[in-house]
Image (tube, rainbow, N blue to C red):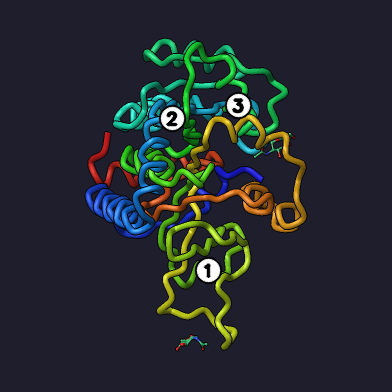
């Protein structure tokens, strides 16, 4: 499935960039505290692997052909191409050494070069953003430890969320994948386009589902339960990214049509951070107007 559609389907929830930061910082502090508890040996390992995962690249996969919205990356949002808005947000992330756009399309490449982005051309045969990231990674002249897959159709992505998924992977050496969730309103829990996630008490993913998880015994949504909505952003250990697209599809992945289940079904660990985020994904042409009026209301330009 396309992780972008998760983002776009996401509902709005109140939140500000500063509270995003607070959540993330809190999560990282907890992670560090946990590391100290695991003991010196583990801490040494963690410290070492933190260093060995220090080189980070952000890749924005962008393709021109989209059945629902051809030319989507170039659509103007308040006068600026969407891909440029995403790139500008990504450039503000402090953990990224490099940000590149990976595309198969000349028009997108030209547009990105005009506003100053580095572009990697990838083949038209890439089936999804993950494959495109992997191909771009192989073509980059430098070596990286972590790749962040930044969805080009979330032009309001907070740089703090990008930094959050990177740091989550840096402090969890046993994880190969990290991603983000935000709170989901009880009235949206039944929507199969909003992918729910459950995590263990150290912030590792247990499962993702289009169905209601956890399921309350009463059969109703529990208005008091903090349901988690999965967001499209993800980051990978680069060694894992090389094998990920090659792993054959798994039964739960196919049943739920959720790519990320392939990671869990193969026994890999995935770190999940909680953020406050109002998702404003652009999936269909009608979304452009929605995001523009949201930005006007908040004086974002
Ligand atoms: C189910 O939800 C209700 C609220 O609707 C809550 O009081 C209850 O503790 C939840 N769990 C169970 C097992 O009923
Ligand atoms: C992307 O597409 C490839 C090829 O169709 C497939 O093997 C893979 O499972 C897909 N998803 C990911 C996350 O690599």
| Secondary structure category for the residue under label 3 | helix
Question: Of marks 2 and 1, which one's residue comes earlier in the chain?
Answer: 2
- Quadrant of residue 113 within the rendered picture: top left
Q: Is residue 242 left or right of residue 159?
A: right
Is the residue marked 3 within 8 Å of ligand 2, measured from its CB? Answer: yes
Q: Mark 3 sits on what residue?
A: 134
Question: Of marks 1 and 3, which one's residue comes earlier in the chain?
Answer: 3
| Secondary structure category for the residue under label 1 | loop
Question: Of marks 2 and 3, which one's residue comes earlier in the chain?
Answer: 2
Is residue 291 among the parts visible in the rendering?
no
Residue 9 x, y percent position in the rendering: 52, 53
Q: Distance between the residues labelled 2 and 1?
A: 29 Å
- Residue at 41%, 52% (x, y): give it: 273
- Residue at 38%, 56% (x, y): give it: 38
Q: In which quarter of the image is the N terminus?
A: top right
The relative height of residue 75 versus residue 250 in the rendered view (above or below) is above
Q: Quadrant of the C terminus?
A: top left
Is residue 35 among the parts visible in the rendering?
yes
| Secondary structure category for the residue under label 2 | helix
The relative height of residue 226 versus residue 174 in the rendered view (above or below) is below
Q: Return the residue nearer the eye: 164 or 276.
A: 164
Q: Mark 2 sits on what residue?
A: 82
Q: Distance between the residues labelled 2 and 3?
A: 23 Å
Classify 10 Å Cα crowding around label 1: few (below 14), some (14-19), many (20 and above): many
- Residue at 49%, 57% (x, y): give it: 204
Q: Is residue 287 left or right of residue 80?
A: right
Residue 27 x, y percent position in the rendering: 32, 55
The relative height of residue 41 versus residue 142 in the rendered view (above or below) is below
Classify 10 Å Cα crowding around label 2: few (below 14), some (14-19), many (20 and above): many
Q: Mark 1 sits on what residue?
A: 189
Task: Name the front one of labels 1 and 3.
Answer: 3
């Amino acid at each position: 499935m396309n992780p972008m559609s998760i983002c776009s389907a996401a509902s709005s929830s109140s939140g500000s960039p500063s509270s995003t930061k607070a959540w993330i910082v809190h999560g990282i502090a907890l992670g560090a505290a946990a590391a100290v508890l695991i003991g010196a040996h583990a801490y040494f390992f963690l410290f070492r692997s933190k260093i060995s995962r220090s080189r980070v690249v952000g890749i924005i996969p962008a393709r021109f052909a989209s059945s629902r919205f051809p030319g989507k990356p170039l659509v103007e949002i308040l006068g600026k191409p969407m891909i440029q808005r995403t790139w500008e947000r990504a450039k503000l992330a402090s953990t990224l050494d490099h940000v590149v756009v990976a595309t198969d399309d000349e028009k997108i490449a030209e547009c990105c070069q005009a506003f100053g982005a580095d572009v990697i051309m990838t083949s038209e045969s890439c089936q999804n953003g993950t494959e495109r990231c992997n191909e771009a990674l192989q073509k980059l002249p430098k070596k990286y430890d972590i790749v962040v897959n930044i969805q080009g159709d979330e032009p309001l992505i907070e740089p703090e969320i990008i930094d959050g998924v990177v740091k989550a992977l840096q402090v969890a050496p046993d994880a190969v994948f990290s991603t983000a969730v935000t709170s989901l309103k009880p009235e949206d829990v039944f929507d199969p386009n909003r992918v729910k996630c459950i995590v263990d008490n150290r912030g590792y993913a247990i499962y993702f589902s289009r169905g209601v998880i956890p399921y309350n015994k009463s059969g109703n949504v529990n208005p008091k339960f903090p349901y988690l909505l999965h967001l499209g952003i993800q980051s990978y250990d680069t060694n894992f990214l090389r094998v990920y697209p090659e792993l054959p599809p798994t039964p739960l992945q196919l049943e739920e049509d959720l790519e990320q289940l392939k990671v869990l079904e193969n026994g890999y660990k995935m770190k999940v951070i909680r953020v406050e985020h109002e998702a404003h994904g652009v999936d269909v042409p009608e979304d452009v107007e929605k995001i523009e009026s949201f930005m006007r209301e908040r004086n974002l330009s």
